[in-house]
Amino acid sequence: MAVSPTPSLSAADLAAIDTQLAATDQLLERNYPGDDGTRQPVHTVYVPADRFTPSFAADWGAEALTTAEAHGGLEKLGALLGQESELAAAVAVRVGAKLHTEPIEDLRLDFEDGFGDRGDEAEDLAAVGAANAVAAAVAAGTAPPFIGIRFKCFESPTRARGLKTLDLFVSTLAQAGELPAGLILTLPKVSTVAQVQAMDFAVSRLEEVHGLPAGRLRFEVQVETPQLILGPEGTSPMAQLPHVVPGRISALHYGTYDYSASLQISAEYQSMEHPVADFAKEVMQLAVAGTGIRLSDGSTNIIPVGDAVEDAWKLHGRLVRRSLERGYYQGWDLHAAQLPSRFAATYAFYREGLPAAAARLRNYVERTEGGVMDEPATARALAAFVLRGVQCGAVGTEEVQALAGVEPSQLTALAHPRLAHTTSK
């Protein structure tokens, strides 16, 4: 009979190692919680703050559908984007429904570049008016699931103005009642860690003043300056952000044109796919991996209007697909006519990948040997891909059930096992 080996490390040795790694355990638990499994919007629409009304989303959806119909319909758009006929037909049905029911997933009322300097009195009134309009839209059920403002940056010339707009907007919303569940605040043109710490202080004070739970006011950081990618000490301030204000930052958004211009890229070549953009976005991915902070790509300013609609759609659709393939599941849209190409490209991405991802997921769940032997990390990625497709409306839960053999709750648990383990305690 085989004799069981006796371990050489004593209980005291194991305890010493636990003590040595206690700080590491705490760091991983606190600073790298992973994605929380909630829905991430596929885009953020930017609009000058004073243009928002409770019917804004529906108006954009109607305009998007009218533009699509004027140019041959949504199936033709799919063909323009390279979709084969069966896929284009399936995508068109879902995109049409999306534009009728939820044309905008995330909306940012812009008090920065899209608003400009109109004087303090005008901006004060606009900030209060925007908050009241958002509250009215939420009450009427016409607000997008995610909505908020972008205010002016914390550089010296605009800091006081940006803080006042932020204060007026949040305070007016708080006085109107419960804050919107999908409220998002956007801090632009961040150059230093200190500016993010100042934002953390500002929203913490607003929480205290209005009796809000600590951490309720999270915010996005716009990555638009080279100083955030590479600081004066030769390190990346970007990597510090999740850890100086843990849990406060919800997302990093890449700013295509400000960032490109700051690196002296001529206007003709400023693009989401320029090499300087790719480098910045790779640093962003590395900086927030595992932290739960999400990522958004920027925008293209080539708008589908006039005689350039189809060419602009092809460009936009290709850029959306490119971002998705690189792990950027969100981007910016600037015009109603970009909505058809946004959703058509996004839905095709998930529908094209669904059969293979679902089959591999089924094999993993059922422990069936196939041509690919996936590890748990890959299974998480497969489940997360499918879950994103469901959350944005590209695929249905009934399709996932048929192809992968998993229920929605099981899909979420596979995509976010750490979350499932935490909630089961």
Image (spheres, rainbow, N blue to C red):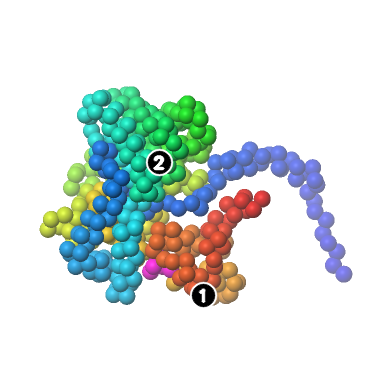
What's under tag 1, amino acid-wise? Gly
Residue 244 is marked as none
Look at 74% across and 40% down and name the residue there. 16
351 drawn magenta: yes
Residue 377 seen in the figure: no
Q: Is residue 347 left or right of residue 2?
A: left
Residue 250 seen in the figure: yes
Q: Which residues are magenta?
A: 350-354
> Is the stretch drawn in magenta largely helix, strand or loop?
helix
What's under tag 2, amino acid-wise? Ile
Residue 272 % position (x, y): 29, 50
Residue 237 % position (x, y): 43, 35
Give the labeled residue for mark 1: 371
N-terminal label among 1 and 2: 2
281 drawn magenta: no
Look at 54% across and 45% down and name the residue there. 32
